[in-house]
Amino acid sequence: MAEFSWLPRSPLEHALVVGACGAREVAPGISLTEIRNFDLIQIMARRGKGAELANAAKARFGMAAPEVPKAVSASDVTLIWSGPDQFLVLSKGGKHAMDILSQAFSQSASLSDQSHARALISISGTKARAMLAKLSSLDLHPASFPIGAAAATSIDHTSVNLWRGNDRPDGQAVFNLLVFATFAESLWHTMLDAAAEYGVDIGHSAEV
Amino acid sequence: MRIVCPFCGERELGEFTCLGDAKPVRPAAGASEDEVFDYVYLRDNIAGEMSEHWYHGGGCRAWLKITRNTLTHEICSVEPAAGAGARQAAR
Amino acid sequence: MISSQPHRLASGGLIDRSAPLNFRFDGKTFAGFEGDTLASALIANGVKLVGRSFKYHRPRGILTSGSEEPNALVELRTGARREPNTKATTAELYDGLEAASQNRWPSLRHDLMAVNQLFAPIFVAGFYYKTFMWPAKFWEAVYEPAIRRAAGLGRAAGIADPDHYDKAWAHCDVLIAGSGPAGLAAALAAGRSGARVILCEEDFALGGRLLADGGTIDGMPAAEWISRTLAELATLPDVRIMTRATLFGVYDGGTYGAIERVNDHLPSPPEHQVRQRLWRIVAKRSIVAAGAIERPIVFAGNDTPGVMMASAMRTYVARYAATPAKRIALFTNNEDGWRTVETALGAGLQIAAVVDARPDVSAAHRALAAKAGFPVLNGSVSGVDGGKDGVRKISVALAGGARAEVEADGLAVSGGWNPAVGLTSYHRGRPKWQDDISAFVPDGAPPGMVAAGAANGAFGLGACLRQGFAAGAAAAQSAGRDGNRGTPSVADDEAFSLAPLWHVAGKGKAFVDYQHDVTAADIELAQREGFESVEHLKRYTTLGMATDQGKTSNVAGLAIMAAVSGKSIPGTGTTIYRPPYVPVAIGAFAGHHRDENFHATRLTPSHHWAAEQGAVFVDTGLWKRAQWYPRAGEKDWLESVTREVKAVRGGVGFCDVSTLGKIDVHGPDAGAFLDRVYINTFSNLAVGKARYGLMLREDGMVYDDGTTSRLAEDHYFLTTTTAKAGPVMQHLEFCRQVLFPELDVQLTSVSDQWAQFSIAGPSARELLKQIVDESEDLSNEGFPFMGAREVSLRGGIKARLFRISFSGEMAFEISVPARYGDALVRNLMLAGKQFGVTPYGTEALGVMRIEKGHVAGPELNGTTTAADLSLGKMMSTKKDFIGRVMAGREALVAPDRQVVVGIKPTDRARRLRSGAHIIPKGETPGPDNDQGYVTSVCFSPTLDQWIGLALVERGRERIGEIVHAHDPLRGENYDVELCNPVFYDPDGGRQRG
């Protein structure tokens, strides 16, 4: 009997080359980091069960799930608004994986595992907004898109979830982007194209 | 054109698709062929204010009922569909 | 040695004499300075002749100093970067710039096409419609090609543009077009209030007319005021000043288009940078401070090189220290023209005479004339003596009827100013006439927009500052910004007086539209021939239809039409204004989306593995799918596909079918919901089972098909075809949210969550046994046909397994979480080695479905009913569903409908082609006996011949009949036999086995 290995392979594994890319004569204005191996569960309230879902979420995560386009974080989980009466649960290490959450929300919501359906890219740097302005029609000005703001939107006709995480230690804003896995490589190339003039620093990480 | 999605806020036209006249209501089961024919084929195309079904497919995937002036493209009102999100509709 | 710029002043101007630049025009090398445009550098070098006109090939010089230029159009750059019709007046000079004049042969000075001037009588307005009429077939073959060669302007590069372009979004409270006094004052007021401001200036320098006209603001010279203002704006974090950026359009909801020429001022963009960027700007409010455009007066010979707008003449002298002429005559009907006299005298140039159409020239001007020793003539210029080397002499018709002649080498003309009303009029706005300036001014504007300063008809410097500041303050306030905005800057208002004058009668051609060679006589002719409406006038004469959009010509054209038709100018009206305000390269609209980035692509989880195998990929919508996997020695696709089909039918193969749309349908009412969207019933499907489902559109036609499995009481897993994945999701959400909001059901796309593979062939089960955990029962009893459940794989991964078959073989579909898709194919290859496992592509998939008679896209083509596809029995009679009532319409159940049948050529060796028409045997093909068409064909390795599916009238009753296939597109005619569409294993034993 053959021995099978089941190495997960990120949708960006082929396209992502760690290191510098684009303009070299300047300090990189963009950092692109792919976050690999996360758990992502979509939770949608059942009809008329918005209040029950809110209670169950508070009990499970110790914080209210966002009811408007925002992302909220605790130490081990981020809840990202993804539409009316629905949100995404982003975590890692199986603590909030499908089988566990199904129990917690069985009375109030429908759950769908999206852990493999998306790629997660973190975008930061002094030119992050300039680069995102080429991709997104959203207004990402600090006053319009503060820390914790989230949006279900489209880039290049591709659905994405975009939210602003906590700033980097150097004060630069961080934008997190979930894109459908089969579109990820295409969007990655588009992002590199948009970022090249600013200089890009590319990496990947297992830390959510 | 910009549309204020009741869930997402103001977004650009490219995130939405328009299905057209929102006035016709799907007849209940058991309706006559004539009633269904009217529902399927008789659509208004008003030069002026008209209510339309729009889909925020590039955003929150909510169906919206938008009242829009087809002459000026002014958007007069945007409402979510009866069953958008987890809204409880009357049985 | 490069020429020494003989027409350059020794001092002054905004050029950098320490930064010399070399450039070439028509092969000759010249020198200029940083800060020059191509036009100003040519003027500094004494070049007067820069191009030939469109129809008559008349010698033309530089008329203006801005983006309204109709004459000085050149081909800029060479090779793939060659760009025709570039305005020399806005092209920034860079070292090594190469430009060539247009529309001349063999050279600019000796243009043989100038012979067209002799034929001028036939080139009058509407000559296309009058001249090239007979014989009709000559139009395409002879006339049009000849006209296109002779006319047109520059030549396109004809090769792909090597540069990159991109598009970006910007958002602000207040958007300002123009950086003259009004624009800068608006930016100050809005910026100080705390508003987010974007100011677009098409020039590379900020200041608008202040750059040439100067003036005193707040007691300081204009230049100092500009630098102080810019310094203050730079301290405001939310004020963004964009130079080389033209606001070209206004769209719905406060969206604006701007084109930024990021690197047009360099020979080529630096690495990783774009040439141009197209901006979509979303603004709560906008202020058009785009200024005004000086208008010519129409008189004979007004296109002679050396005749120039008065404001342009002083711009070249004051801003660029370049002298278009040494001895200048001015022809004006207004006060502002006199500024050129002051500037020219200040630069040490001579004034030959001022011809002023107004009788009452001010005492100050008369004193100036006396002091400088030039005559002031009350009258108008009626002719110009000169040619390609410029102006020599002008004829003046004096007010009293006498004539005079003035020797001059340059003629400055001012007919007044037209506010730039384009942006304010783009939403079908019609400007209104303002008598005191004899010009159209904005009459309202698109929502959120106002005009200020000269663009609003306020020509005084003080008024521009006041209006700009007030508009900036009001815009900021209405956007909710209320910071301390200080006080507006102050300047005097110059006197403005004007005596309207549009056209001076005289002998010789008098041009209205320089770029399209439309003369005053053409407009008069159009009126005589009945083309009096402005929209007719425009199209008949082509007035204002060139790339300059008539910026210098439209109002004069209207005025002449008004005069000959006896109407007022406002009564004659304007044509509709449409964007773009300046030409915008198509490349900028395309941005990043060209070549391999034309649209987003989707890759399957096994894509890179397939690429390693050398798979040939096909574009299916956005997807790249493996079409077949060629092997060494195979001579064509058919050989590869045939091998793949035989390997599946004889052993086992697998195919990535992850492209199918996959939707989680959750909720207590999930079954009831599916019953309403499918024609068949799903609420009674047992957990652990799959069922084929068919959806109709509400009009009764088939919409989509696929299998749906019940994974739990309240959880179905629905699949769609690849093509309809997006539309079906949208349709189901419509059903959920709009049609059936009472049902408790939730939908989520899981298309990208699962890597799904079809594993087909007699050895499929044996192969799977190698992969799944040994505790899983895959026997026919333990996992029967249409079974669906979760299984464990060896190594601890969970998968979903479905026993469904598209190929007609014993087959499974297996789904694993997508990041394991790559591992799954590699493991299948490993485990399947002993069975000769063969990956197959979409071609083999298609062949096997045709052999099995399964319908797909070509049959689900929007014109077929369930019954047409032999699926009518699936339609439940016990429930309502989408499309039920309309599917029962008389025409949709008529017995003579075209239905799916199989076809085989009577000649076994013949190849079939889809699209052929089915005609009764022995009849002549025609629309009356067209009985259907061939939808799908393939070479069947199993039957060793070509087979196909067709939609044929009453086809099911005609099995065995020989009919005629008629293919006029390919010129083929042959006989085919109608047969059962299920060519392979009609009783289905193999897939159940």
Image (cartoon, rainbow, N blue to C red):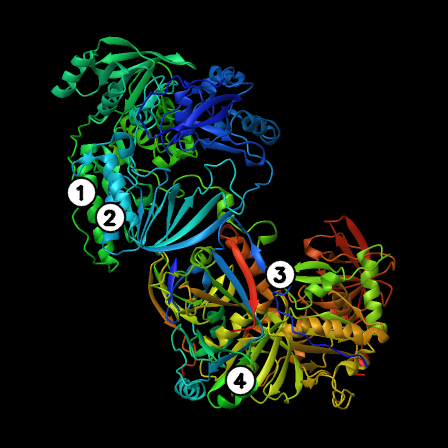
Q: Earlier in the sequence, mark 3 or mark 4?
A: 3
Quarter of the figure with residue B73: bottom left
Residue occupying the far left of the picture: C363
Location of mark 2 (residue): C188
Res. A15 mark: 3
* Local crowd size for mark 1, using a 10 Å CA cut-off: few (<14), some (14–19), many (≥20): some
Question: Are marks 3 and 4 in one subunit?
Answer: yes
* Secondary structure of residue under mark 3: loop
Residue shown at 25%/17% (left/top)? C380
> How many C-alpha atoms fall within 10 Å of the one at disc 2: few (<14), some, or many (≥20)?
many
For mark 1, name the chain.
C
Q: Point out the frontmost of discs 1 and 4.
A: 4
User: In this orientation, which residue lies closer to the viewer: A202 or B13?
Assistant: A202
| Position of the C terminus of chain C by quadrant | bottom right
Tag 1: amino acid? Ser
Residue at the spot of label 4: A95
Question: x%, y% of residue C979?
Answer: 80, 68
Distance of label 3 from label 1 (alpha carbons): 56 Å
Chain identifier of the residue bearing label 4 in the image: A
Mark 4 and mark 2: span between their CA atoms? 54 Å
Give me the disc on residue C489.
Answer: 1
